[in-house]
Image: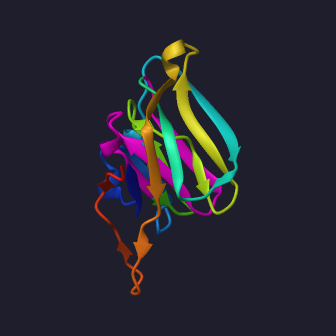
Amino acid sequence: MTIFTEPITTPQFEPFGQLIAAPESFGRQSFATGLSHGDRAPVLSTTHTPPFRLPLTLDKMECHPHSSQSFLPLDVTRWLVVVSLSLEPTDLRAFVVGPGVGVTIARGVWHYQLTALDRSARFAVLMWKNGAADDDQFARIEPVQVQEATATLDGDCELPPPVRADL
């Protein structure tokens, strides 16, 4: 099975979480509505991830049933966020995110590991944990290939159907 990337937008990502970006004008913007946790303590960490190239085959997903998870880019070009509300490969969505945009993945949403494109990247990560075995859940899925959508001559992204069986 193959899925194609799409640019991330607030409406398309809303079922999975919230986008995080600095406001265009001077001032402060709050993202508290996207943050969610049970009885866990906050954990702020940083990570450095190697680059990946598309197409990318993924066969596992992770989920945090007691906490949202926020990824804040510190030194990033493009990166990939693969999310799903279920473990069904047909429900996967692959979003390409540009520099300066972070995401909060909602509590209980399945997602693939942090995936930098083009070059290595550094992120700050915020979530809540209490050390219980169910803080992080991992599951194997049927292998899915993520391919980059092709661009048209006018610069718009031409998206093939969201999911295509290549069996």
Q: Observer-nearest residue: 145 or 111?
A: 145
Residue 49 percent location from the top left of the image? 68, 47
Residue at the (68%, 41%) spot, across then down: 46
| 98 sits left or right of 4 in the view | right
Residue 54, above or below 67: below
Residue 5 percent location from the top left of the image? 42, 60
Image coloring type: rainbow
**Residue 26: in magenta span:** no
Residue at the (34%, 67%) spot, across then down: 159
Q: Observer-nearest residue: 2 or 97?
A: 2
**Residue 75: in magenta span:** yes
Residue 2, above or below 33: below
Residue 126, above or below 51: above
Is residue 118 at least partly visible in the picture?
yes
Q: In this view, which residue lies farthest toward the top?
A: 132
Residue 76 percent location from the top left of the image? 64, 59
Is residue 29 at least partly visible in the picture?
no
Residue at the (55%, 16%) spot, across then down: 130
Residue 20 percent location from the top left of the image? 47, 53
Residue 26, above or below 32: below
| 149 sits left or right of 12 in the view | right
Query: What residue range appears in magenta?
Result: 66-95
Q: In this view, which residue lies farthest toward the bottom?
A: 154
Q: Observer-nearest residue: 149 or 6?
A: 149
Q: How many labels sit on residues?
A: 0
| 5 sits left or right of 125 in the view | left
Residue at the (40%, 31%) spot, across then down: 107
